[in-house]
Image (tube, rainbow, N blue to C red):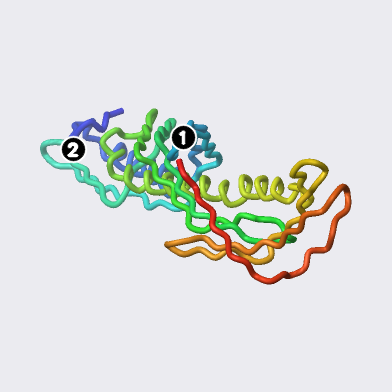
Amino acid sequence: MPEFGSGRIRPAPVEPLLENKSEQLDSLSVDAEIPKVTIPDFTLDITAGPGTGKVSVRELNITKFNSPKFEFSLGDDGLSWSSMRGAVWESGWVQVLAVDIRVNVSARLLGRYDRPQIEIGRCTADVLYFDFEIGGGVIPWLVNLFRDDISKVIKQAIHNQACDTARSILLVQFNDFLMTLPLHVPIGNNFYVDYAVDRNITYTRQFVEAELLADVVYGTDSCHLQHVEPWDGQFFLSE
């Protein structure tokens, strides 16, 4: 069986061999085989700003791909071939390496059931270093024909996975925790503060504005918080 190492090879000059080889390549085209490829699951440590964590990506798949079109011609100096559009997949394996996944998330605080809740806004996940390797029966020089396309698909899958995790699992768990916070908070000497988040927090480039209802009670007594006359207060934060 000839090896596909260059653009021109010399097989035995037998016409049926050419026809059989062409049929074999067509039957193993990328259109049918690439969607069957299982890309390995992986979990990576990530660093984003001051925090660290892990991102796990599972069940990646490629849903659509165009196979190449091969044309063979038998001449005086051997068998010539050319291909267009894609690549041929025979059998093999895939290894994926994604390093330094950085997730940027914007969030805002809302008031719900008298307690603060978080809502995720914009989310981006950038993969600063990404590489994959295909081995086995893939014709080596064809890898570059679809390397960029596969990279885009996997990068997008990583982005979706990271942001979906931030919006769903992590967000739900943190909001569930916020809902467990008591509205009757001890401040010492058997005094307590009853508080409630009265409305959603307002955000601007200059300030963050929140409206809280609070009352100081003694002992285990509690009260139903009502609106009171507005008052102004200043809070200073320093490093």
For residue 50, say whether it is visible.
Answer: yes
For residue 62, say whether it is visible.
Answer: no
Specify the amino acid type for callout 1: Ile
**Is 3 above or below relative to 102?**
above
Quarter of the image where one finds residue 27? top left
Callout 2: helix, strand or loop?
Answer: loop
In the image: residue 212, left or right of residue 225: left
**Which residue corresponds to the image point at 68% horizontal and 60% vertical from the top-left?**
197
Quarter of the image where one finds residue 214? bottom right
Looking at the figure, which quarter contains the C terminus?
top left
Location of mark 2 (residue): 7
Mark 1 or mark 2, which has the lower sequence index? 2
**Is 95 above or below relative to 88?**
above
Location of mark 1 (residue): 46
Callout 1: helix, strand or loop?
Answer: strand
Q: Position of residue 7 (x, y in %)?
A: 18, 38
Calculate the distance from the C-alpha at mark 1 to the C-alpha at mark 2: 43 Å
In the image: residue 41, left or right of residue 224: left
Q: Position of residue 89 (x, y in %)?
A: 39, 39
**Which residue corresponds to the image point at 49% horizontal and 47% vertical from the top-left?**
237
